[in-house]
Image: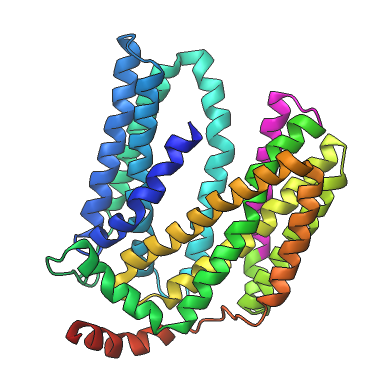
Amino acid sequence: MATVASLPLFLFTLPAGILIDKVNRQKFVCRINVCLASVAAGLAVLGWLHLLNSYTILASVFLVGVGFAFNAPARASIVPQIVSDAELPSATTLGGLQLNISGIIGPVLGGLLVPLVGVNFVFAVNGACFLLVVLAVRQWKQSTPQPTLASESFFQSLAPVIGYMRNAPRLQVVLARNFLFALFVSVIPALMPTVGLKVLHLGSSQLGFLFTSMGAGSVFGAVFIISWLRARFSSDFVTFTANLLIVVAFVLMAFVRQAEAFFIVAAFAGVGWTLSASELWVAAQRAMPNWALGRMSATVIMISQGAMAFGGFIWSCAAAVAGPVYTLLGASVLFLVSLLLSSRLSINVKAGFEEKISGTLTGELIAA
């Protein structure tokens, strides 16, 4: 199930980013959410007809993943058009905050509704929620026309982005830092369930509380901490401190054996994850030119997801060989070393810095 859900992000995110720069983003997001609503409604209908089986469920999960793969870079490219540059950090934090809140409420709400009204009704409600997203997006009034690409092939559309990234060192730094962060933070989804089940011997309900604790920490960090830090410190300092908090969480996960204390450690890991991911995404958004927001947002997502998948494979294999405790300790040491080595790679991207050179580069690339 997890493989089928994540595979579309690797297959379709970059093509989606190229497509987004060619079409009207508002209409595109609306159509994607209508398709997602159709899939959810189809599951409800199949359930009522008693035609649901493992194959139809897996196929539906794949289709939902395709929708998310196309939706993610589209929504990411819309945000800088809706808010000002000064509001971009807060908007990015709010976007991550709503994901964390939904990650806490959604499973709990679904678990309560299924025994009361049945799975099919929950699928139907899910479809209605996608339609609510469509209604919300339709309220967006575009103040400036979106730059669109001419009719080009996939590689023709990708070539200017590659050329731009080759001449944009700030963006290269942001991409490298995103890759390193995703590579090491993948320890949490890869090993935390293993530690909870095999080391702490948690039950299924307690394991749910474990992920809820991490989500609660993410919400706390987004609401109470990140704005205070941004007002006083640079992006480099905030990111380094957040990553250092994750390193400490790795070490504590290796030694803490009391469930309640482990929940607190998971909450700290959630705080660090949210702070670092938010700062890195803001830096990426500021380093992207407006003419390629869709394609470059998709590139950042693909790099992060690829690093998460690669890291998850590495840490899982390490845990199978050396055990989760030694893997956590090894990951903490390697993460700390990477932080010290990458400390000179600044992500303090000044707003508009890359835009100043984008016009010249774009002209050169088009001429080439």
Please provide the residue range marked out in magenta. 200-225
Q: Nearer the viewer, residue 152 or 130?
A: 152
Magenta residues, dominant SS class:
helix
Residue furthest to the front in view is 321
Residue furthest to the left in view is 151
312, above or below 344, in the image: above
Q: Residue 167: where, in percent of width, then height?
A: 39, 85
Q: Residue at x 23, y 66 (%)?
A: 155
User: Could you tell whether 48 is left or right of 26 in the image?
Assistant: right
Q: Residue 332: where, in percent of width, then height?
A: 76, 58
Q: Residue at x 65, y 76 (%)?
A: 342
Q: Residue 336: where, in percent of width, then height?
A: 75, 66
Q: Residue at x 55, y 31 (%)?
A: 107
Q: Locate the C terminus by quadrant.
A: bottom left
Is residue 255 within the magenta segment? no
Q: Quadrant of residue 195?
A: top right
60, above or below 335, in the image: above
User: Could you tell whether 93 is left or right of 57 in the image?
Assistant: right
